[in-house]
Image (cartoon, grey):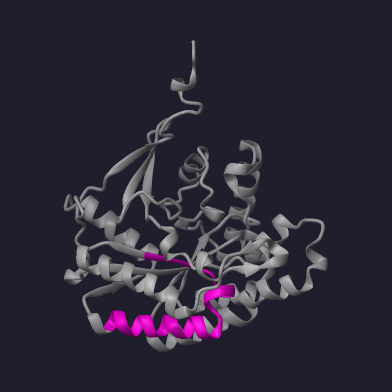
Amino acid sequence: MIANPIPWPDGARCAVAMTWDMDADSAFNWYNQTTADNLVAALSWVRYDPLIAIPRLVENFARLGLQQTFFVPGWVIEKYPAQIDLLLNNGHEIGLHGYLHERSNEISEEDERYWFYRGLEAYKKHVGKTPRGWRAPSFAFSKHSLGHLLDTGIEYDSSLMGDDIPYALRDGSSGGSLLEFPVDWTLDDFPHYAHNRDLGYRMPISSPQRAHEVFRSEFDAAWEYGALWITVWHPALSGRLARFKAILELLDYMRAKGDVWFARLDQICDHVQKLMAEGHWTPRCETLPLYQSPLPEFSKD
């Protein structure tokens, strides 16, 4: 089923990376710039993320001996430094996730550059180094995003949805490349759980059992065919009691099945780079941009 299977460490059947987007109240402010302070119930909803969910996640993952990747906007790093330190001190990876969860493909190239570098500086100021990985807020990767990542030495992205295993992105202008660790909406908790009238989210709320029917079926297929299984979960959603309990049960299921490599995305990056350097595996490569819009076929000349 997978045309270019990747060998996982120690003969594992698949790789599992439970990643979390720790947005807190960043996107809340981006989309409600003049009214955020008056949306008090919605503000409490998003602040559940750093104040309640993050300590819960850290405590339980420490008990299980698991380390995760958390993508965090620069503004959140500035506003919740204690939570960032808690994650770092427990061995979790912090990736960059914009500055105020801005959607890069909905703003100008100049504005994208401004917010990207503001987020990067916030990250470097607190963490003390350049992040190895980035995820575009809301997966809003623009035709300029790859250039910013390459210019700053970021080694991988996890925003796109073009494969079941890692692949490479090459910049058509510079020729530079980095690794892409693909995601998919099926493993994002937002379509299952996000409902908040103040913020315009009106999805039907799934039970944890229904959501995890989807998550588990995707894991079973990844395990059978050797894929990379990456979640995109949000502490304000999946960090709540019943939903996080279901995650712990899913972890028990995965561990019982066996032959699973649980890893942070930076560890997966190390593994893939080592395979490539030793000539044991070569990723499929896509060159961006794929084309310029509008397509020439639209011309009637």
Q: Residue furthest bottom?
A: 63
Residue 12 in the figure: left or right of residue 169: left
Question: What is the magenta range?
Answer: 230-255
Q: Of helix, strand and loop, which mostly describes the magenta segment?
A: helix
Residue drawn 37% across and 80% down?
A: 250
Asked where in the image residue 237 lies, by quadrant, the reply is bottom right
**Taking the image as drawn, is residue 65 in sight?**
no
Residue drawn 54% across and 70% down?
A: 234
**Taking the image as drawn, is residue 74 in sight?**
yes
Which quadrant does the N terminus fall into? Answer: bottom left
Residue 39 in the figure: left or right of residue 4: right
- Image coordinates of residue 256 in percent, x first then y, are 25, 84
Q: Nearer the viewer, residue 277 or 53?
A: 53
Magenta span contains residue 245: yes
Q: Nearer the viewer, residue 275 or 288?
A: 288
Give the vertical position of 97 relative to 92 (above or below).
above
Residue drawn 49% across and 14% down?
A: 300
Residue drawn 43% across and 50% down?
A: 160
- Image coordinates of residue 112 in percent, x first then y, are 62, 43
